[in-house]
Amino acid sequence: MSAHYPYERRKCYRRLCAILSWFIILILITIFLIWLILRPTKPHFILEDATVYTFNLTTTSATLNLLTTTLQLSLAARNPNKRIGIYYDRLDVYATYRGQQITPPTSLPASYQGHKEVTVWSPFVNGNAVPVAVYLGMEISQDQNAGRVLINVRVDGRVRWKVGTFISGRYRLNVNCPAYLSFGGGEYSSNSVLVGSTAKYQLVQQCYVDV
C-alpha cells in the first residue's frame, strides 16, 4: 500500500501539469484568435507644421561643411483602432537631409493612446554645427539657391498594443515625414507665414509609418 501511494501521487501530478499546460495553451490560442479578429492597424502620423529658426550651412574648408538647424515641429499621431490602445514607450524625433541625420534625436514623453484618440507633440530639434559630407553641402546650397529644400522628419521608437487587459510585446516603430522648406530672397511659399524673422510652414503632411 505504501509503495503504491507515491506512484498514484506522481500520476496525479502529471495529470495536473497536463491540465495546466492545456489551459495555458487554450488561453494563448484565445488571445491569438482575438488578435486576428481585431487586426490592429498601425497609427497614423501627420506633420502639421514646422517653424524654422535656423538653417545655416557654413563652409570652413574644402573638406568640411557645418550645418546648424533649429526647428520646432507640430507632430500629430492618431490611433485608428476602435478596440485597441497603443502605448508609446519611447519615441525619438530628428531631421535628415538626403539620408544623413542633421540633428540629434529629441525624446518625446512616453504616453498611452486610447481608441480613436489623437496625440500632438511640439518638440524642438536642434543640430549645432553638424558636419555634413562635401557633396551634401553642395546640394544644400543648390537647393537653397533654387528656393526649396526637402528635409525628412523621422521618428523611431517602440510601441505596444493593448487589447482589453492584454498588452503585447514591444514593436519597432519607424515614421518618415517629408517636409519642403522654401528659401530665397525673403519670398516664402504659399504654405508658410512669417513669425518675426522666422518662417512657419503649414505642411499637414501625411507620414509613412512602418511597424
Image: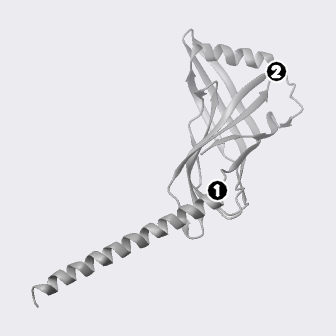
Q: Note whether 69 is above or below 142 in the view shown.
A: below
Q: Residues within 10 Å of mark 1 (few under 14, many from 20)?
A: few
Image point (68%, 16%), residue name: 139
Q: Quadrant where the N terminus lies? A: bottom left
Is residue 85 something that shows in the picture?
no
Front residue of 119/129: it is 119
Place of residue 63 in the rendered image (x, y in percent of width and height, measured from the top left) = 54, 11
C-alpha gap between disc 2 and disc 1: 47 Å
Image point (59%, 21%), residue name: 66
Label ID, residue 39: 1
Amino acid at pointer 1:
Arg
Place of residue 36 in the rendered image (x, y in percent of width and height, measured from the top left) = 60, 58
Q: Residue furthest top?
A: 62
Labels 2 and 1 touching (C-beta < 8 A):
no
Place of residue 201 in the rendered image (x, y in percent of width and height, measured from the top left) = 81, 37
Q: Residues within 10 Å of mark 2 (few under 14, many from 20)?
A: few
Image point (58%, 13%), residue name: 134
Front residue of 4/129: it is 4
Image side of residue 109 versus residue 169, left or right:
right
Give the image's coloring scheme: one colour
Label ID, residue 207: none
Place of residue 10 in the rendered image (x, y in percent of width and height, measured from the top left) = 21, 78
Q: Residue furthest right?
A: 190
Q: Note whether 163 is above or below 179 in the view shown.
A: below
